Image (cartoon, rainbow, N blue to C red):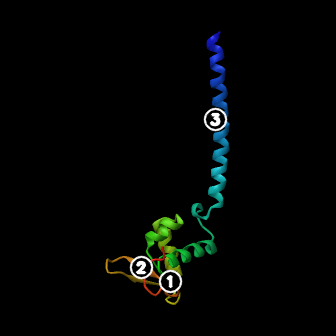
Amino acid sequence: MMMLFGFFPLLFLFLVFSVLGVFRRIAVARHVGENPKFRDEPPSGRLDGTVFSLAKRHGGQLTLSDVVVETGLNLAEAERYMDSLVDNAHVSVEVDENGRLCYEFPELRNDTGEKNE
C-alpha cells in the first residue's frame, strides 16, 4: 500500500513536466515562426536592415560567413542574397588577398577601415 502512495507524486510530477514541455514547444514554435532568422524566406526589408547594420559594424566590409552567422541563412542563400545586393554603387564585391569574396559597402566605410566594435 505504501508503494502505491509513493507512485502518485511521481505520476503528478510527470504530468506537470509533460504539460510544461508542451507549452515550451508551442512557445518555441511561435518564436521560430516570428523570427526572420528561422524563416525560409525572410522579409527583404528586415534582412536588408540586418545586413547593412552588420556592414556598418564591420567597417563597410562583409564576408559571406559574416552574413551567415548574423542572419542564420545557409551559405547558398546568403550568397544569392548578397549577390542580389551588388549594384556597384551601394554594394560591390571584391576578392581579397586570401581569395575570399568581400562585399564592400562604400557608404558605410569608416575612415580607418577598421571594424566598429
Left or right placement of residue 32 versus residue 68 in this view: right
Quadrant assignment, res 11:
top right
Q: Amino acid at mark 3?
A: Phe
Label drawn at residue 86: 1
Q: Earlier in the sequence, mark 1 or mark 3?
A: 3
Q: Amino acid at mark 2?
A: Cys
Q: Nearer the viewer, mark 1 or mark 3?
A: 3
Q: Earlier in the sequence, mark 3 or mark 2?
A: 3
Callout 2: few (<14), some (14-19), or many (20+) C-alpha neighbours within 10 Å?
Answer: some
Q: Which residue is mark 2?
A: 102
Q: Amino acid at mark 1?
A: Val
From the top left corner, tell me how far across and down residue 27 is, in percent.
Answer: 66, 50
Task: From this view, report whether residue 107 is shown above or below residue 46.
Answer: below
Label 1: which secondary element: loop
Label 2: which secondary element: strand
From the top left corner, tell me how far across and down residue 77 is, in percent.
Answer: 50, 69
Q: Nearer the viewer, mark 1 or mark 2?
A: 2
Q: Which residue is mark 3?
A: 17
Q: Residue at x 67, y 54 (%)?
A: 30
Q: Nearer the viewer, mark 3 or mark 2?
A: 3
Q: Residue at x 57, y 63 (%)?
A: 37
Viewer-proximal residue among 4 and 101: 4
Check whether the beta carbons of the residues at disc 1 and disc 2 lie within 8 A of each other. no
- In three-dimensional space, the C-alpha distance between marks 3 and 2, rounded to whole angstroms, equals 49 Å
